[in-house]
Amino acid sequence: MTLMAEPALGRFGDFGGRYVPESLVPACAELAQAFRAAWADKNFRDELDELLAVYAGRPTPLTPARNLSAALGITLWLKREDLAHTGSHKINNVLGQALLARRMGRTRLIAETGAGQHGVATATAAALLGLRATIYMGERDIERQHLNVQRMDMLGAEVIPVGTGSRTLKDATNEAMRAWVADVDGAHFLLGSVGGPHPYPWMVRELQRVIGTEARRQAPGLPDVVVACVGGGSNAAGTFTGFVDTPARLVGVEAAGGAAMTNGATGVVHGARSMVLQDDEGQVSEAESIAAGLDYPGIGPEHAHLGAIGRADYRTVTDDEVVAAVRRLARTEGIICALESAHAVAWVLRAAGTADLPAGSTVLLTLSGRGDKDMGAL
C-alpha cells in the first residue's frame, strides 16, 4: 500500500476527521488550504529543505548497533533522530509548520508539550524566524522535564503550567487548543504529533516523512522489521512512510500504561476519531508512563487505521523494561536515548530470538530523541 497524499475529508479509513468547535472549523480549513498550497510550492519546499540541512543537521545517520546485534543474534540499525538539532525528530515538523505560520501572516506559535522536546523545538524555530512562542506544559511534566523548561526559557518562549486533570500532555493540549480558539487570526497552533483535527495528522506525517525517506535510502537492504515508539506517533508515522509500500513489517511500541491502540476503543480525542483509552462510561481515561511524551490517551488516526487493516503491529512494554533498555543501549553502544525511544529498544530486547522477532532478522529502529532530559528519572 501507499499513503495517500491527502486523505479525503481527513479520513484514514474509519479514523480521522475534524471534530472541533464551530469556531475552529474555518481555521482548520484555512490551514489545510495553506499547507496544500505551500507543499506544492517549490520555493517553500526548497527553504524547508535548506533549513533541515544547514540548521537541523539532516540527514541524520543510520548507525549499526554492532555490539547489541551480536548479543541478540539480529542485525540492528538505528535511525539517529537524537542527533538532529534540539535533540529529537520534533524539529522536522516544527520548522515546516513555523515556515507555514509565517507564510500565513501569523506572528505567534502556540504549542503543547509533554517531554518538552516539542516545546524546545517550537521555541527554537520561533527564535530563528522572529515569532513569539507560547508553550503549554502540564505541571507534572514541568517537574520531571525541568531541563527542557530551562531550555525553552533560554530561547525566549513563554511556558504556561497546566494544573488541571492529570497535569500532563492531554491537559496541555486542551489548554493550547483553547488558546488557539481565542487567537485564531494572530496565532498558529503548532501541534506536535499526528493527532488532532484535519489537516494535522496528514500535515505532520508529511513533515516527518523525511525520516522514512532517508532511512529507506540509507539502509543497505530492505529490513525485515521497522520499529518505532508510539504515543501520538509522529516519529513512527514519519518512519513508516518509507517502508509502508514494502514487505517490511511495521511495529509501533506503546507504553503499557498508555496503550491506546492495544487497550483502547474507538472514540474522539482532541478533534480526531481514533483509538482512545476510555472508562466504562466512555470518558477519556488517564494514561501513565515513565516517558512524559508517551502518557497520552490516544493515538494518531493513521496509526489506528494501519492497525485496523493489519499493516502495522502495535506492542507494549513496561516502565521497568524501558529503564533497562536505556541502560543496556548506553552500556553496549555508548548511546543514551530518550525514555520514549527506549520503548522501541525494549521491545527489540524482549522479542529478539522469539517468534515475534526471529534470530537473523534485520531491524531498523528509529531513536526519536536523546536522553539528557531523562537523567533524573533513571
Image (cartoon, helix red, strand yellow):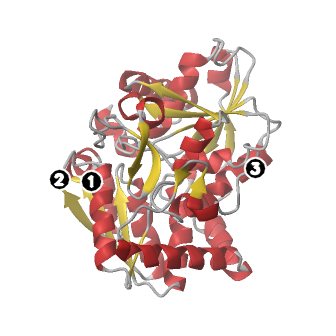
- Secondary structure found at label 2: loop
Real-space Cα separation, disc 3 to disc 1, in angstroms: 34 Å
Say whether disc 2 or disc 1 marks the residue closer to the N-terminus.
2
Looking at the image, is mark 3 or mark 1 earlier in the sequence? Answer: 3
Residue at left 80%, top 36%? 222
Quarter occupied by residue 220: top right
Indicate whether 362 appears above or below 31. Answer: above
Q: CA distance from mark 2 to mark 1?
A: 6 Å
Labels 3 and 2 touching (C-beta < 8 A): no
Camera-nearest residue between 266 and 179: 266
Numbered label attached to residue 2:
3
Instruction: State the CA–CA distance, disc 3 to disc 2.
Output: 40 Å
The residue under label 1 is which amino acid type?
Asp
Q: Residue furthest right?
A: 221
Quarter of the image for residue 116 reads bottom left
Category of crowding for the residue at label 2, using alpha-carbon neighbours closer than 10 angstroms: few (below 14), some (14–19), many (at least 20) = some
The image quadrant where one finds the C terminus is top left
What is the number of the mark on residue 39?
Answer: none
- Do residues under tags 2 and 1 come within 8 Å of each other at their CB atoms? yes
* Residue position marked by numbered label 1 in the rendering: 171
Is residue 156 something that shows in the picture?
no
At label 3, counting other C-alpha atoms closer than 10 Å, the crowd grade (few under 14, some 14-19, many 20 or more) is: few
Q: Position of residue 201 (x, y in %)?
A: 54, 58
Q: Which residue is mark 2?
A: 164
Residue 60 position in % (x across, y down): 65, 52
Classify the position of the N terminus by image quarter: top right
Q: Position of residue 217 (x, y in %)?
A: 79, 48
